[in-house]
Image: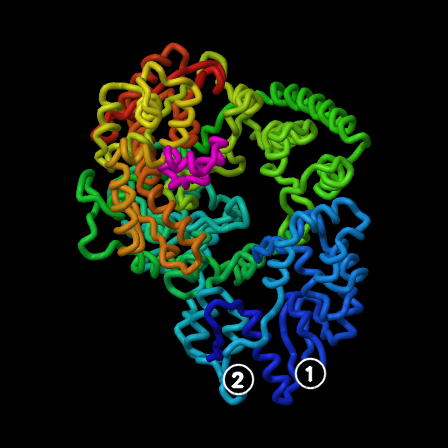
C-alpha cells in the first residue's frame, strides 16, 4: 500500500525531483531519503537530504562542506566523473578529485569547455577536447529533471497501514523473522512446536529400541562438524536421541545400522543421508532403499540458495526451524550431554523429516522409476541420485594419495619464479611496489607510465586492474601487464592448490574431498574441502599439479573420459543430420564444422580454423552471442556473427533445437533433460534485459549439460557396481566434469580400462555412439597424457 509514481522515459530520480519541487512550492518542508549523492543537487531552501549511508541530514551548507562545492555545481562534477553503473560516460581520465578541482576553478561545465585551452594538466585538457560531447551528454544524464507531468496530490501520498497478511508472507519467504514478529500474531508462518526427543542413555536401552524399529527409520547426524550423536525415529515415530559421548552407544548404534543398511526390505530416511552412510562406511554395499529429503528438494527446485534442513523446511513448510546455534553450538560452545536444547533440536529435526517426506512425495502420475522410460523426476531420483549416494561415500572414504614432497618442491620453484617476476615488474615500473595492491598498481600503470585508462571500478571509481584490463593492455604491446598476468596466475595456483593441498592430507596420506549432489543447478556434481574440479589443465603449471596425485606401489591411476559428450548429446537431441553423420563415421567434429563454416575441404582446415570451430561448437551449447564469440576469438562481433550464421545454416537442426527449446521454456518456465531432470527458469519473464538473456542462455545449455551430467552419474553407478562384482580391488576415486579417476592394480589396468569403457559407453543408447578414452599411469598427469 505504498503509492507508486512513474513517468515513462524518465528515471526515478526525475520523478523524485519533480515531486520534491512541487511539494516545496506548495509550502511543504521536503526531506529526500537516499544514499545517492546525485540528489545533493536538489538541496536548497525547502529541500534537505537525509543520507542513509552516513545517517546525516544535509542542507545546502552541509553539502558544500562535505562535497566541497555547493548543490548547484554537483551535476557538473558528476558529468565530468561519469558513472559506469548508470552508463554515464563522463570524461576519461578525470576522477572525482580532478572534477571538483576543475569545476571549483572554472565555475561550471560550460565555462570549463569554453576555456579548455587554459587547463594546465595535459591529460585533462586533451580529454576534455576529445570527449566534449560525452561531457555534455553526461551533464544531461546526471541532471535531475523537476518538470515532469507527475500529479502531486498530498492526500494520495499519505502513508496507509500495510496489508499485514501479505507483508507477513513476504517477510517469512525472505527470512525476515524479526520483522515478521513485529507485525504480531496470525498469518501462514508455521510455528508449530515439535516434540523434544527422549534420550537413550545406556547400551541395553539402545539394543531394546533398535529391536523395535519399524521397516522405515529416520536418522539425522547432529553436530557442528563431525556428528556427536544421531536423532533416531523410535517405535511409533517417537523421536530418540543417541549421544555418542555416552559410553558404548556409538559402536552399538553403528553395528545395528550396518545390519540395517544390508537389508533390502528396509528404508533409510533422513536429510543428507550420505552423512549417515559415512558413519557406517565399512558396511559395504547398501541394499536398503534411501529416502533423502535433501535430494528430493534439490530435484524439485535445483536453484535454491541452500538445501540444509532449515532452508528446506522454510521453503516447503514455511517453518523456521531450530538451528545448531539455538542448541548451544555457537562460538566454540557445545551443549552438555542431556542438555534440553539438544533434545529439542533432535526432536524437531525428526519431526520435520516426517512432515517433509509427505510434502516432497512424487506427484500423482509421476513415473516411479523402474529402470526405463517414461522418465521424470522420480525416475531421476530412483535410478540416478539415490543409488549414487553410496558410490560417493565410497569415493570420499577412499580418497586419493598425494605426493606431498612433490608439491613442496613445486612450491619452492614457484616462489622463486614469483620473486623473479616481481623484480622484472619493479624494473619495468622504475620503482618497487606491491604487486598485490590494486591501488598501487593503478598508480604505476596509469599515472606514472601513462597507460590508457580502459575502465574504472564501480564503487570507488578507482583504476581497474582486473584480468580483462591487463589482457587488453598486454595485447597493445605493453610489457608490464604481461608480467603481472603471469604473476597472478602463478600466485593463485601456488596459494589455492600447491600450498593448500598438503595441509588437507589425512593421516592416511590421502586427500579426501567431499562430493556435493545438491549444489549445481545443472545436475553436475561439485567437490569441496578441497575443490578438485577447478584445477586448471590448460596451462603447464596446472598440469604439473596433477603429477602430485599418485597411486601406491603396485597400483596405477586409471582415467576414463567421455569424448565430446555434450556435443554428442546436442546431436542426439537436435537430431542434426550433419553432426550425426560426423559422429557415426568417427570424423573429427571440429574439423567438420570448420570445413563447413569456412568453406574449405576438411583436409585443408588449419589449426586456427579448427580452434575457431571448437569455440563455436561449444559456444553454441552455452548460448554464446556474437559479442562473446568475437571476444574469445579476438575478432569483430560482425565477423563472429557471420560465423554463427554459417554454423546455423550448416546445422539447421541446432537452430531448430534452440528455437523450440526457447519457445517451450517461455511457455512452461522450465526445461528438462532427456531423463526428466527439471531446471526452472523464472528469470525468462524478467523485465531486466540482461537477466532475461542470461536465462535464455541457461535454457539452451541446461538440457545439454544436464543430460551429460545424468549420463555421467549413471555411468558412475554402473562402474561402481561392476567393479564390485568383477574387480573388487579396483575403486573409483574422483570425478571431474566428464572424467572418472580410478585406482587399480597395475596388472589389472588393461582389464579395468576395458570394463570401465564398456560400462560408460553402454550406459545409454543415443543416436550417436558414446566414446570413452582411457589411459593409466603412476600419477594423474601420466594417466591423462
Q: Measuring 53% from the left and 44% from the top, which residue is drawn there? A: 226
Question: Callout 2: helix, strand or loop?
Answer: loop
Q: Position of residue 424 (x, y in %)?
A: 74, 24
Q: Measuring 18% from the left and 41% from the top, which residue is drawn there? A: 373
Q: Is residue 624 magenta?
A: yes
Where is 596 relative to 279, above or below? above
Q: Is residue 242 magenta?
A: no
Q: Nearer the viewer, residue 624 or 448?
A: 448
Residue 460 as seen in the image, left or right of residue 281: right
Q: Is residue 390 visible?
A: no
The boundaries of the magenta stretch are 618-643
Q: Nearer the viewer, residue 724 or 284?
A: 724
Residue 123 as seen in the image, left or right of residue 193: right
Q: Which mark is residue 46?
A: 1
Q: Which mark is residue 152?
A: 2
Helix, strand or loop: magenta stretch = helix
Badge 2 vs badge 1, beta-carbon distance below 8 Å: no
Q: Which picture quadrant has residue 728?
A: top left
Report crowding for label 2: few under 14, some 14 to 19, many 20 or more residues within 10 A (C-alpha): some
Q: Is residue 685 visible?
A: yes
Question: Callout 1: helix, strand or loop?
Answer: loop
Amino acid at each position: 500500500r505504498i503509492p507508486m509514481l512513474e513517468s515513462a522515459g524518465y528515471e526515478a530520480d526525475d520523478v523524485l525531483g519533480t515531486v520534491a519541487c512541487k511539494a516545496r512550492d506548495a509550502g511543504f518542508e521536503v526531506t529526500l531519503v537516499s544514499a545517492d549523492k546525485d540528489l545533493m543537487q536538489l538541496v536548497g531552501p525547502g529541500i534537505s537530504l537525509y543520507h542513509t549511508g552516513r545517517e546525516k541530514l544535509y542542507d545546502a551548507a552541509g553539502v558544500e562542506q562535505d562535497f566541497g562545492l555547493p548543490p548547484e555545481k554537483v551535476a557538473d562534477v558528476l558529468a565530468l566523473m561519469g558513472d559506469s553503473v548508470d552508463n554515464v560516460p563522463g570524461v576519461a581520465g578525470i576522477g572525482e578529485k580532478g572534477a571538483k578541482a576543475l569545476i571549483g576553478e572554472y565555475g561550471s561545465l560550460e565555462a570549463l569547455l569554453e576555456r579548455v585551452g587554459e587547463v594546465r594538466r595535459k591529460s585533462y585538457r586533451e580529454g576534455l577536447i576529445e570527449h566534449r560531447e560525452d561531457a555534455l551528454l553526461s551533464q544531461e544524464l546526471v541532471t535531475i529533471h523537476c518538470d515532469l507531468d507527475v500529479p502531486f496530490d498530498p492526500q494520495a501520498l499519505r502513508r496507509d497501514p500495510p496489508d499485514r497478511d501479505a507483508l507477513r508472507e513476504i517477510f517469512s519467504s525472505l527470512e525476515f523473522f524479526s520483522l515478521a514478529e513485529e507485525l504480531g500474531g496470525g498469518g501462514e508462518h508455521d510455528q508449530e512446536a515439535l516434540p523434544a526427543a527422549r534420550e537413550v542413555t545406556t547400551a541395553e536401552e539402545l539394543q531394546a529400541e533398535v529391536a523395535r524399529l519399524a521397516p522405515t527409520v529416520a536418522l539425522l547426524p547432529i553436530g557442528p562438524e563431525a556428528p556427536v550423536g544421531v536423532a533416531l525415529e523410535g517405535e511409533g515415530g517417537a523421536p530418540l536421541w543417541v549421544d555418542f559421548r555416552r559410553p558404548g552407544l556409538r559402536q552399538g548404534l553403528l553395528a545395528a545400522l550396518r545390519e540395517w543398511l544390508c537389508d533390502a526390505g528396509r528404508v533409510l530416511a533422513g536429510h543428507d543421508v550420505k552423512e549417515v552412510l559415512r558413519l557406517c562406511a565399512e558396511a559395504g554395499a547398501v541394499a536398503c532403499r534411501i529416502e533423502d529429503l535433501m535430494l528430493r528438494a534439490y530435484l524439485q527446485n535445483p536453484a535454491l540458495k541452500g538445501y540444509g534442513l532449515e532452508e528446506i523446511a522454510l521453503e516447503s513448510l514455511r517453518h523456521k526451524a531450530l538451528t545448531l546455534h539455538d542448541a548451544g553450538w555457537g562460538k566454540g560452545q557445545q551443549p552438555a550431554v542431556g542438555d534440553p536444547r539438544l533434545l529439542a533440536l533432535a526432536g524437531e529435526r525428526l519431526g520435520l523429516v516426517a512432515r517433509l517426506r509427505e510434502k516432497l512425495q512424487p506427484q500423482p502420475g509421476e513415473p516411479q522409476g523402474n529402470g526405463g522410460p517414461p522418465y521424470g523426476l522420480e525416475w531421476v531420483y530412483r535410478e540416478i541420485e539415490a543409488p549414487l549416494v553410496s558410490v560417493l561415500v565410497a569415493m570420499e572414504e577412499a580418497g586419493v594419495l598425494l605426493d606431498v614432497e612433490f608439491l613442496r618442491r613445486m612450491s619452492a620453484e614457484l616462489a622463486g619464479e614469483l620473486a623473479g617476476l616481481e623484480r622484472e615488474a619493479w624494473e619495468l615500473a622504475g620503482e618497487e611496489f606491491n604487486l598485490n595492491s590494486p591501488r598501487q598498481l593503478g598508480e604505476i600503470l596509469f599515472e606514472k607510465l601513462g597507460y590508457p585508462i580502459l575502465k574504472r571500478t564501480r564503487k570507488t571509481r578507482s583504476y581497474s586492474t582486473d584480468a580483462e584490463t591487463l589482457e587488453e593492455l598486454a595485447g597493445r604491446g605493453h610489457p608490464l601487464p604481461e608480467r603481472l598476468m603471469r604473476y597472478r596466475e602463478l600466485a593463485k595456483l601456488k596459494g589455492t592448490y600447491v600450498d593448500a593441498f598438503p595441509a588437507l592430507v589425512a593421516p592416511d596420506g590421502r586427500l579426501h574431498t567431499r562430493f556435493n549432489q545438491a549444489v549445481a543447478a545443472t545436475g553436475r556434481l561439485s567437490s569441496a574441502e578441497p575443490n578438485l574440479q577447478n584445477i586448471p589443465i590448460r596451462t603447464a603449471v596446472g598440469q604439473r599439479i596433477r603429477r602430485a596425485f599418485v597411486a601406491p606401489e603396485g597400483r596405477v591411476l586409471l582415467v576414463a573420459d567421455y569424448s565430446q559428450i555434450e556435443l554428442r548429446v546436442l546431436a542426439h537431441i537436435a537430431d542434426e543430420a550433419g553432426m550425426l553423420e560426423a559422429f557415426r563415421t568417427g570424423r573429427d567434429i571440429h574439423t567438420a564444422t570448420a570445413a563447413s563454416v569456412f568453406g574449405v575441404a576438411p583436409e585443408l582446415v588449419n589449426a586456427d580454423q579448427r580452434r575457431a570451430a571448437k569455440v563455436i561448437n561449444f559456444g553454441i551449447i552455452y548460448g554464446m552471442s556474437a559479442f562473446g564469440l568475437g571476444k574469445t576469438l579476438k575478432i569483430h562481433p560482425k565477423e563472429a556473427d557471420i560465423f554463427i550464421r554459417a554454423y546455423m545454416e550448416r546445422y539447421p537442426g541446432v537452430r531448430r533445437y534452440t528455437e523450440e527449446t526457447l519457445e517451450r521454456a517461455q511457455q512452461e518456465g522450465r526445461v528438462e533433460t532427456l531423463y526428466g531432470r527439471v531446471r526452472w527458469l523464472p528469470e525468462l519473464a524478467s523485465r531486466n534485459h540482461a537477466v532475461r538473456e542470461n536465462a535464455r542462455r541457461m535454457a539452451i545449455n541446461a538440457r545439454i549439460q544436464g543430460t551429460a551430467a545424468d549420463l555421467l552419474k549413471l555411468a558412475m553407478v554402473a562402474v561402481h557396481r561392476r567393479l564390485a562384482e568383477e574387480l573388487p580391488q579396483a575403486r573409483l576415486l574422483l570425478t571431474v566434469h566428464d572424467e572418472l579417476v580410478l585406482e587399480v592394480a597395475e596388472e589389472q589396468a588393461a582389464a579395468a580400462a576395458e570394463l570401465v569403457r564398456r560400462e560408460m559407453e553402454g550406459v545409454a543408447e543415443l543416436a550417436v555412439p558414446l566414446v570413452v578414452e582411457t589411459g593409466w599411469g603412476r600419477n594423474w598427469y601420466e594417466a591423462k597424457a
